[in-house]
Image (cartoon, rainbow, N blue to C red):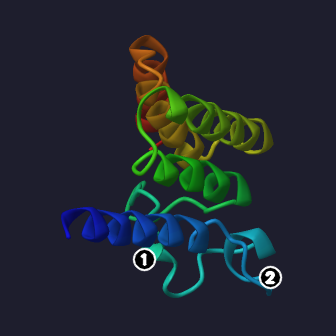
Amino acid sequence: MRFERGLVVALGIAAGACATTGTGGGATGPSAGGAAASGRAASGLPQVTCNGAAPAVTSFANAAEGSLNRTMVIRGAAAAPLYQAALTSAQQGIAADANNPLHYYLAAQAYAGMNDLTNADAMWTKAEQLC
């Protein structure tokens, strides 16, 4: 019985991760070039605010967040490629918009998951500076 409940919880987390990665149909929200659409705050992205405003959520941030969400279900050595994918997406976001602190925050999360605390600290510091 416990095993079945665990599977249901894991499936719910995985479904939530897939639902927040922007795999839906229409072009809405930040990927369409604007601020977050209503209900976007419920996506599971960290609530990073700078001077009272949330930074733009991009497709790179959505991809990184999706990979990080999957690490909640997949643990250990199997999670390493997910952390790397999150880091790659966050770095692409940094390359596209070096002034968006959300990308640095997500890169820090990925580095922390890979136990690279020096780079994680550097990314968190940069995100804080941008805010």
What's under tag 1, amino acid-wise?
A: Ala
Residue 4 versus residue 130 in the image, above or below = below
Drawn side of residue 40 relative to residue 30, left or right:
left
Q: Secondary structure at mark 1?
A: helix
In which quadrant is the C terminus drawn? top left
The label on residue 90 is: none
Question: Where is mark 1, residue-wise?
Answer: 42
Residue extending furthest top? 118
The label on residue 27 is: 2
Residue 95 versus residue 112 in the image, above or below = below
Q: Residue at x 47, y 54 (%)?
A: 69
Q: Residue at x 61, y 40 (%)?
A: 86
Residue 106 versus residue 65 in the image, above or below = above
Q: Residue at x 41, y 26 (%)?
A: 112
Q: Secondary structure at mark 2?
A: loop
Percent x, y of residue 59 = 72, 60
Drawn side of residue 8 relative to residue 23, left or right:
left
Tell me the CA gap for discs 1 and 2: 18 Å
Residue extending furthest left? 2
Percent x, y of residue 117 = 39, 16
Mark 2 surroundings: few (<14), some (14-19) or many (≥20) residues within 10 A: few
Observer-nearest residue: 109 or 94?
109
What's under tag 2, amino acid-wise?
A: Ala
Drawn side of residue 26 relative to residue 79, left or right:
right
- Comes first in the chain, label 1 or label 2: 2
In which quadrant is the N terminus drawn? bottom left
Percent x, y of residue 110 = 51, 33
